[in-house]
Image (cartoon, helix red, strand yellow):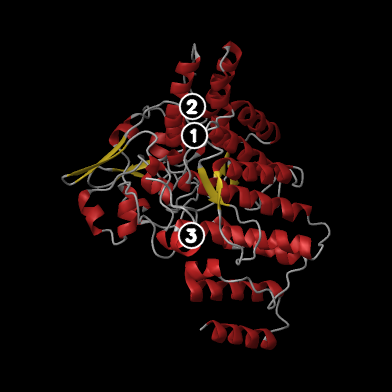
Amino acid sequence: MKKLVISALEDLQAKFKHMKKTIILGIVISVFSITFGCKDFLDKKSDTQFAIPETLEDNQALLDRNDLVNDGSISGEVSSDDIYVTEVEFNNISYESDKRLHTWQSDYVSRSSGNDWERCYRKINIVNTVLFNIQQYKITGSENIKGQALVWRASVYLEAAQLWCLAYNKNTAMTDMGLPLRLDPDMNIPSIRSTVQQTYDQILSDLHTAVNLLPDKQIAVSRPSKVTALGLLARTYLYMGDYENGLKYGKQVLGLYDKLMDFNTLNSLASYPIIAMNEEMLLPVAISYSPFLSSSMAKIPLALYSSYADDDLRKTVFFRTNTAGQILFKGNYSGTSQRMIALTMDELYMIVSECYAELDGVDNINNAMEILNELLITRWKSGTFVPFTASNREDALQIIRAERRKELLFRGLRWADLKRYNRDGANITLSRTIGAQTYTLSPNDLRYAIAIPEDIIKMTGMPQNKR
């Protein structure tokens, strides 16, 4: 089969040699992905004879492909406590792996194809190809494109680390199992798991390098900028519990860009009140499809919905009620039913506020509340917002974490938050009851590091996450 495909591609190359090289490369990637699937895709050597992307335009075109802004991971959202489905809906879902993921099973939680692992490493391969091309063909003036590629690689590895690794813990990071760090497009290089420390070191290295290569703004929000790289640095350090650096880079973002939407200007009666590519968007990534996350199936727990005050505009902008009286989420930053795991400005305000509070001290607590209130006043009905105050670190963090959950609902962040909160002693136990069966997930349970797809383990010989 492979020989037939290669032969067909060679015929295409000869027949259409006048076409742009990036188009031909896109055909190669698509055909190989479809023909060989995830397992073979990760096992086949990259063949660049069909197209040599040696210009800035060719490599920018590779980064502008829809692969990078689409196909965000589903595992964190499906596993989190922000949604539930009814028993009838659960039983009618055809993806057994998704059902196992939703109930925190120890294994077989990934589909045989089209799973999060495949999607993440396909993106990483595209980015590695661009970085290889820049070096291999000595492309001049490529700083911007190299910076974009590094941000994309770091963002995907950070997303992946929240799924398949335990929460970063400075005391165990040197021995906890991390991700296979593939930094070269050659697929013949064996996949070997790094440590969690090595994984985060790579993420930070990519982002710090990118900051010095990128302009403050790009011509399109889908292209990472310096603000994007700084924002991801703030997120990464927050996840690591390094609050000084989280604050440092979060403040740098706010120094360059600080725009927020005023929810008073939104039409809360619209099907999807928040428009796509709005002024808060820093890096748009759409979540892949899972029935658990569909606009009609994913229900919001009543206790979470009730935590929004009546004058809090998020209560009407984010939610709608179906005919059964159940709460559904409509506050997607896509402007449609598409769920997003984007990096956004409101998240940066939350990061800066939380990092201030974690550093303690009267001035830091006051600064934490000030930043939080700057965000929340744009979310409340005009003239009704009463600023939050806190007298100590514990009170401030309780307020900030409650508002973070309400503000960043359905952004692919809750799973990572649960892991780091429990690492720091929050002792949050998750529980679901479906029919007569109750499922629980204890604080710091090893299942917070989701099982790597079994075919990947078999193919590479890498160790599976401990159970």
- Which type of secondary structure does the marked residue at label 3 adopt? loop
Q: Is residue 175 left or right of residue 107?
A: right
Eyeballing the image, is 62 above or below 328?
below
For residue 55, above or below residue 338: below
What kind of residue is marked 2?
Answer: Ser
Q: Is residue 267 visible?
A: yes
What residue is rendered at 44% in x and 36% in y? Answer: 419
Quadrant of the rendered image containing residue 216:
top right
Q: Which residue is mark 3?
A: 461
- Disc 1 crowd, CA 10 A, few/some/many (<14, 14-19, 20+): some
Q: Which sits in the foreground, 197 or 425?
A: 197
Front label number (3 vs 2): 3
Q: Residue at x 32, y 41 (%)?
A: 300
Q: Secondary structure at mark 1?
A: helix
Q: CA distance from mark 2 to mark 1?
A: 7 Å
CA distance separating discs 3 and 1:
54 Å
Specify the amino acid type for callout 1: Asn
Quarter placement of the C terminus: top left
Question: Is label 2 in contact with label 1 (beta carbons under 8 Å)?
Answer: yes
Q: Looking at the image, is mark 3 or mark 1 nearer the viewer? A: 3
| Label at residue 264 | 1
How packed mark 3 is, by other alpha carbons closer than 10 Å (few <14, some 14-19, many 20 or more), is few
Amino acid of disc 3: Gly
**Residue 121's spot in the image, x, y percent?**
55, 59
- Residue denoted by label 2: 382
Circle nearer the N terminus (2, 1): 1
**Label 2 element class:** loop
Q: Position of residue 281 (x, y in %)?
A: 58, 44
Which badge, 3 or 1, is on the more N-terminal residue? 1
- The answer to whether 286 appears left or right of 321 in the picture is right
Label 3 vs label 2: CA separation? 58 Å
